[in-house]
Image (cartoon, grey):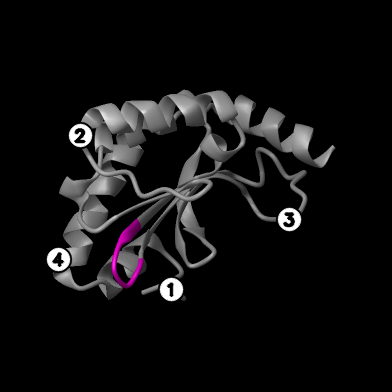
Amino acid sequence: MVSSKAATVEEYLAELPENRRDDIQQVREVILANLPDGFEECMQYGMIGYAIPLEDFPNTYNGQALGVAALAAQKRHISVYMHGLYADPELTEWFVEAYKQSGKRLNMGKSCVRFPRAEAAALDLIGEVIARITPEQLIAQHEAAHG
């Protein structure tokens, strides 16, 4: 599944094959356990998203809730998109180095960490990145980038 038409997280999870659902659920639990107050879980762009609700911050450049992270089951891997990581070079540098030290293989794009199964990921580090980015920091990053 690359992009889902599910309206809710529960519908998204129900669409997944059981083994993928279990992996996504493990990653989801880590994200939810570390998600700072002010973010909410939602469906965004066909993935499970974690965003500042529009009623709390409506001034986004595209009219969509400002997302800090997203979780998706792709065809061959799981993707965690950490938008706040992308916007903070120092945090990115820390994350890459800590991931290398974890002994897990890092497969990363600009903000996306990919892994075949939940146990192949450094979930503790993903949780730590999620915990480090507050709604206020994400708004500041957004305003710096979009004026």
Residue 44 colored in magenta in the image = no
Helix, strand, or loop for circle 3? loop
- Quote the CA–CA distance across marks 3 and 2: 40 Å
Q: Which residue lies at the image location 69% right of the left edge and 39% below the top edge?
A: 57
Q: Which residue is mark 3?
A: 63
Left/right placement of residue 144 relative to residue 31 reads right
Residues at marks 3 and 2 touching, judged by CB atoms closer than 8 Å: no
Q: Of label 4 and label 2, which has the lower sequence position?
A: 4
Return the residue nearer the eye: 104 or 117.
Answer: 104
Magenta highlight range: 74-78
Nearer the camera: disc 4 or disc 2: 2
Q: Which residue is mark 2?
A: 103
The image shows residue 107, relative to residue 130, as above or below, that is below
Q: Of label 3 and label 2, which has the lower sequence position?
A: 3
Which numbered tag is attached to residue 28?
A: none
Which numbered tag is attached to residue 4?
A: 1
Q: Which residue lies at the image location 34% right of the left edge and 40% below the top edge?
A: 31
Q: Which residue is mark 4?
A: 19
- Quote the CA–CA distance across marks 3 and 1: 20 Å
Residue 112 in the image: x percent, y percent?
Answer: 45, 50
Q: Amino acid at mark 1?
A: Ser
Residue 94 in the image: x percent, y percent?
Answer: 44, 24
Q: Amino acid at mark 4?
A: Asn
